[in-house]
Image (tube, grey):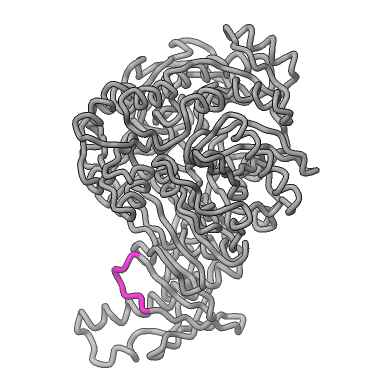
């Protein structure tokens, strides 16, 4: 077995590989850029080598720098993680020439399957059903428009070397095809150093289901069942699960066998994923093969009990797979929520800054009989930079059934504390409660269809609001008693703290009476209903774990004047707890209105201005592109919300922008 491996990656996947290597008794080497000097993967590894400035194209994807780190440390093998150099044939060849093992597939398989154009041609030759499209290289935007028209709109414009949603655009007409081609080409060049583009038909009602395969160097190849990855935003996966609630055993077997046949056809070894789209009739079509470990691999590990990273290392060391296809059964259900540094209230635009609070849920077995797992590459006090992918963590839960796994995820999301940056925890929580998701009635259009105007928070239904009101009232009584004790104002504080309160939450008033005892409190509502609240929460704690009528409720708690900021199930609530007289006076207070920014274009994220599409004095129309801001490897086109005239432009191409910087003003 290898004594030392180098991880040619960063963030959570580097930390993930280190964990398996450590379990196997293998020493690890991390590489890092200036921006990652204090990163978690650097702290976890046995050794660390600096490889350059923050931009990936000057550090993490410079093959010569990685090879120099390998020579310097004497690493015998390299795990590439995903992204960066993981599907780079030249990197695999460089390692082979150096006599260093690549913990991944042969360079020939990377060349055949890692390139989306070539892989689709091979799949077609092997008799695999593929999505209609143009597999040749496309010279310019006008040719892209011509090809798109021949295929028939809508079309998907994709980077040949792409992944993770980078270099991908959907076009519904000629203008969008022209614009999408230019943006995809630019993103692909910046992210992968390869600007080749191809176009295929966009299937409007697909499910995205992928098959995990694992092959050794002795001719053995198995599939570890499927993952459902249909909950996507901007072609980037957000929620994954294993198995899929849509597949029947026959379709699962057919897809798995086809994936194995394709892997064998290209002499594949190591872990890989064959991606399909599946229509409502369970017809499936090959999309691509990812010749690497997938981001969402933990859900497969949770339902099969197989450590994929360990098996990749063992395969690279020449060992045979320790199991056969019939040994790989499905045990329970697993969910994964990708936690991104992006602001769901600002159309999911990237957010950077310091993690002033980062407290993930406790990993391991839960009280409900499930499992929580959190793969991460950050820590409290660390920084999220603008140079890399915005993923913070992958929160996974396991349960005996799909419903159980979803409930475990709800509680885990509510327990996860993140402060200091914008993040998508509220959105993930909203998905977990969405009736269509709960029923399994999902397609890749789920987010676009169910959140067409974006995400502006969650309005809780009345039964849950009542639980929140009861919890707030009980928590307030604890706080009032504590204040009485601290102030020393009264000896018998129990009698002096009032029983009657009015809880105002989500615009609704709930008059309640609170009767406390040593075990908790009973909160009675005006209509005669009552709820029992039990908790060991004390004032000042940022997380409250309660039982409300015997059901677990987890609240993130912040103090407000006269109440609390409570967050749960994707809702961000201001809960005011007032005496009846205070509530009466509060109804007379005027509402404070936000400032008017309707005549300004504000920067929604930290980033770099890469293009200005208008000039001062130009008349613009609704939907017209105004400028392009690049952040976290993605180009974001900012558009006019209504007709107007550009009065002034306060930014310049190449300049850095912060959140809410005024880019331009309108007359």
The magenta segment is 536-542
Instruction: Give the residue at the far front of this rendering.
Output: 218
Position of residue 21 measured from the top left corner of the image (x, y, whole percent)? 33, 49
At 24% from the left and 88% from the top, the residue drawn is: 490
Q: Is residue 362 toward the left or the right of residue 124 in the image?
A: left
Residue 243, horizontal then vertical, whole percent:
62, 54
Q: Is residue 580 visible?
A: no
- Quick check: 403 above or below 318? below
* Residue 321: percent from left, percent from top: 50, 49
Q: What is the quadrant of residue 589 in the picture?
A: bottom left
Q: Nearer the viewer, residue 404 or 648?
A: 404
Q: Does 538 lie within the magenta span?
A: yes
Is residue 45 positioned above or below 334 on the image? above
In front here: 319 or 325? Answer: 319
Report x, y in % for residue 581. Answer: 43, 74
Q: Main secondary structure of the magenta part?
A: loop
Residue in the picture at 33% in, 53% down = 24
Give the residue furthest to the right: 281
């Amino acid at each position: 077995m290898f004594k030392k491996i180098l991880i040619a990656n960063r963030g959570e996947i580097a930390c993930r590989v280190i964990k398996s290597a450590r379990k196997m008794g293998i020493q690890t080497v991390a590489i890092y850029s200036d921006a990652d000097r204090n990163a978690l993967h650097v702290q976890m590894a046995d050794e660390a080598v600096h490889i350059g400035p923050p931009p990936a194209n000057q550090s993490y994807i410079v093959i010569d720098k990685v090879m120099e780190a390998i020579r310097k440390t004497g690493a015998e093998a390299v795990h590439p993680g995903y992204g960066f150099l993981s599907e780079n044939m030249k990197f695999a060849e460089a390692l082979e020439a150096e006599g260093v093992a690549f913990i991944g597939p042969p360079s020939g398989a990377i060349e055949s399957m890692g390139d989306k154009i070539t892989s689709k041609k091979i799949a077609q030759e092997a008799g695999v059903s593929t999505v209609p499209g143009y597999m040749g290289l496309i010279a310019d935007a006008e040719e892209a428009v011509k090809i798109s028209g021949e295929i028939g709109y809508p079309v998907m414009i994709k980077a040949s070397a792409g992944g993770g949603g980078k270099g991908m655009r959907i076009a519904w007409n000629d203008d969008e095809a022209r614009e999408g081609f230019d943006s995809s080409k630019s993103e692909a060049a910046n992210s992968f150093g390869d600007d080749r583009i191809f176009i295929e038909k966009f299937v409007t009602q697909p499910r995205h289901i992928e098959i995990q395969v694992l092959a050794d160097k002795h001719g053995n190849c198995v599939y570890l069942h499927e993952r459902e990855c249909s909950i996507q935003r901007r072609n980037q996966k957000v929620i994954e699960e294993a198995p899929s609630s849509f597949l029947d055993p026959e379709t699962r077997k057919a897809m798995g066998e086809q994936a194995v046949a394709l892997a064998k056809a290209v002499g594949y070894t190591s872990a890989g994923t064959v991606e399909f789209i599946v229509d409502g009739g369970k017809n499936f079509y090959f999309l691509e093969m990812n010749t690497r470990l997938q981001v969402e691999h933990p859900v497969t590990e949770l339902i099969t009990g197989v450590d994929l990273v360990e098996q990749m290392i063992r395969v690279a060391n020449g060992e045979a797979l320790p199991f056969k296809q019939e040994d790989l059964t499905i045990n329970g259900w697993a969910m994964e929520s990708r936690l991104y540094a992006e602001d769901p209230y600002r159309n999911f635009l990237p957010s950077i800054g310091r993690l002033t609070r980062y407290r993930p849920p406790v990993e391991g077995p839960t009280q409900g009989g499930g499992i929580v797992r959190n793969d991460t590459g950050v820590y409290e006090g660390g920084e999220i930079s603008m140079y890399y992918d915005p993923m913070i963590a992958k929160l996974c839960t396991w349960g005996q059934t799909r419903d159980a796994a979803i409930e475990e995820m709800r509680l885990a999301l509510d327990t996860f504390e993140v402060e200091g940056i914008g993040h998508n925890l509220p959105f993930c929580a909203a998905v977990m409660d969405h009736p269509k998701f709960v029923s399994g009635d999902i397609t890749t259009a789920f987010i676009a269809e169910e959140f067409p105007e974006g995400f502006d928070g969650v309005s809780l239904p009345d039964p849950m609001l009542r639980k929140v009101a009861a919890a707030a009232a009980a928590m307030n009584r604890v706080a009032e008693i504590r204040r009485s004790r601290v102030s020393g104002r009264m000896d018998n504080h129990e009698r002096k703290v009032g029983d009657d309160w009015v809880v105002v939450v989500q615009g609704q008033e709930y008059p309640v009476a609170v009767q406390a005892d040593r075990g908790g409190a009973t909160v009675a509502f005006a209509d005669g209903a009552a709820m029992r609240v039990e908790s060991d929460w004390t004032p000042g704690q940022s997380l409250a774990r309660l039982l409300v009528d015997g059901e677990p409720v987890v609240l993130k708690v912040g103090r407000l004047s006269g109440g609390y900021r409570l967050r749960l199930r994707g809702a961000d609530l201001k809960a005011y707890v007032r005496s009846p007289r205070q509530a009466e006076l509060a109804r007379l207070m005027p509402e404070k209105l936000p400032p008017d920014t309707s005549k300004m274009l504000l920067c929604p994220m930290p980033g770099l201005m890469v293009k200005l599409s208008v000039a001062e004095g130009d008349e613009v129309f609704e939907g017209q592109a105004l400028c392009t801001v690049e952040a976290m490897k993605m180009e974001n086109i900012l558009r006019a919300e209504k007709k107007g005239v550009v009065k002034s432009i306060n930014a310049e191409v190449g300049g850095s922008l912060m959140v809410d910087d005024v880019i331009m003003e309108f007359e």
